[in-house]
Image: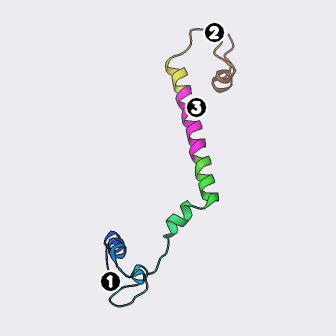
Amino acid sequence: MKYVHVECLNQWRKVAANRDNFFQCQTCKYKYKFKRTWFAGLLTNPVIVGLCTMFVLLLLIVLCGFFGLMLGYFFPSEEEDVGFLWFLIAGHRWA
């Protein structure tokens, strides 16, 4: 009985009459090993969660800025002064 579905094992453990069967096999007395996967441990690390949050936030800021620039490029303003930011990006054109 080397490979067992986790769902099947959990269901069997729930219906077992003896409380000890929750932690060990009723037939062979093998003690179950409860261990988190390394990926689950990584995702619950506060430093990793903070870094992922900052990365996603920075990515959203960059994407919003890019789409804002594209909107300004494809739908230019009819006014002569389009703002200081556009002046920095496009450069000043002397008449």
- Give the x, y percent position of residue 58: 60, 42
Mark 2: which amino acid? Glu
Judging from the image, what secondary structure is the residue with disc 2 in?
loop
- Give the x, y percent position of residue 51: 62, 53
Residue drawn at x 63%, y 58% is: 46
Q: Residues within 10 Å of mark 2 (few under 14, many from 20)?
A: few
User: Which range of residues does the magenta coloring cover?
Assistant: 56-68
Give the number of the disc on residue 16: none
User: According to the image, label 1 marks what residue?
Assistant: 2
Mark 1: which amino acid? Lys
From the image, which quarter does the C terminus lie in?
Answer: top right
Q: Please indicate whether residue 7 sits to the left or right of residue 42 in the image.
A: left
Q: Nearer the viewer, mark 1 or mark 2?
A: 1
User: According to the image, label 3 marks what residue?
Assistant: 65
- Give the x, y percent position of residue 88: 68, 25
Q: Please indicate whether residue 21 sits to the left or right of residue 64 in the image.
A: left
Q: Nearer the viewer, residue 13 or 58?
A: 13
- Give the x, y percent position of residue 1: 30, 84
Q: CA distance from mark 1 to mark 2?
A: 75 Å
Q: Nearer the viewer, mark 3 or mark 1?
A: 1
Residue 70 lies in magenta, yes or no?
Answer: no
